[in-house]
Amino acid sequence: MSNTPPSVELRPVEPRPVEPITFLFEDDGETPNNPRLPLILYRDAVDVSGRDPAAAFEAIFARNGWGWGWRNGIFDFRHFHLRAHEVLGIARGSAQVEFGGAGGKVIEVRAGDVAVLPAGCGHRRVSSSRDLLVVGAYPPGNDSAHSTPERVDRAAAALTIAGTPMPPADPVYGETGPLMRFWPA
């Protein structure tokens, strides 16, 4: 009999090497977005074949210093984080997600994908499979509270977003990962 909790993966967890896709979203008049840092999408970066695919994302994110995580879905209303960068790992299912606010882009994400959102990047779930499971996390020193377009002064938001601390590592590939190239300090 094992004392290992069922949510802990027993196999080593390593991301697959994939080429990142980036999207840069400007302020669209409602959502501030981040005019300097792009959203980074890693397609099929994590093997989700284990008995607890969410645990694989949690292990990878934690190893790279991204914590304060959660398991759930994606809100169906447009929101963003003023003082936090966020990583979303799709552990199960799929979703159509609007990134970048009303002037942004709807992107399908599916099991194994990882989206790294800079502070200010608007996002909302447009639709999803019934089995959608997302793992989210934040780098240290970030405040994960969210805001919505109607509740924020965009000029003040832009200053707050610009002051959000940079993460010490890519949440998937660590200190030398692609995020460090696309998000220069």
Image (spheres, rainbow, N blue to C red):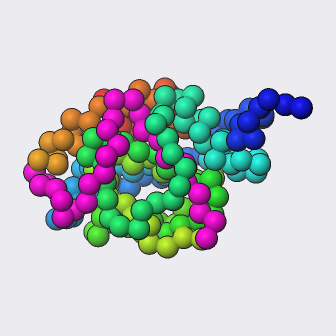
Between residues 107 and 68, which one lies in front from this camera angle? 68
| Residue 63 can be seen in this image | yes
What residue is at 22 percent from the left and 62 percent from the top? 149
Vertical arrangement, residue 136 with respect to residue 75, above or below = above
As drawn, the residue found furthest toward the bottom would be: 127
Q: Is residue 72 left or right of residue 147?
A: right
**Front residue of 54 and 28:** 54
Query: Where residue 138 sits in the image (x, y, percent)?
Result: 42, 38
Left or right: where does residue 89 sit relative to residue 8?
Answer: left
Q: Quadrant of the C terminus?
A: top left
Asked whether 146 falls inside the magenta stretch, the response is yes
Q: Is residue 116 left or right of residue 128?
A: left
Quadrant of image for the N terminus = top right
Q: Which residues are magenta?
A: 130-155
Vertically, is 168 above or below 71? above
Residue 2 is covered by the magenta coloring: no
Residue 50: x and y in percent read 76, 47
Front-most of residues 104 and 87: 87
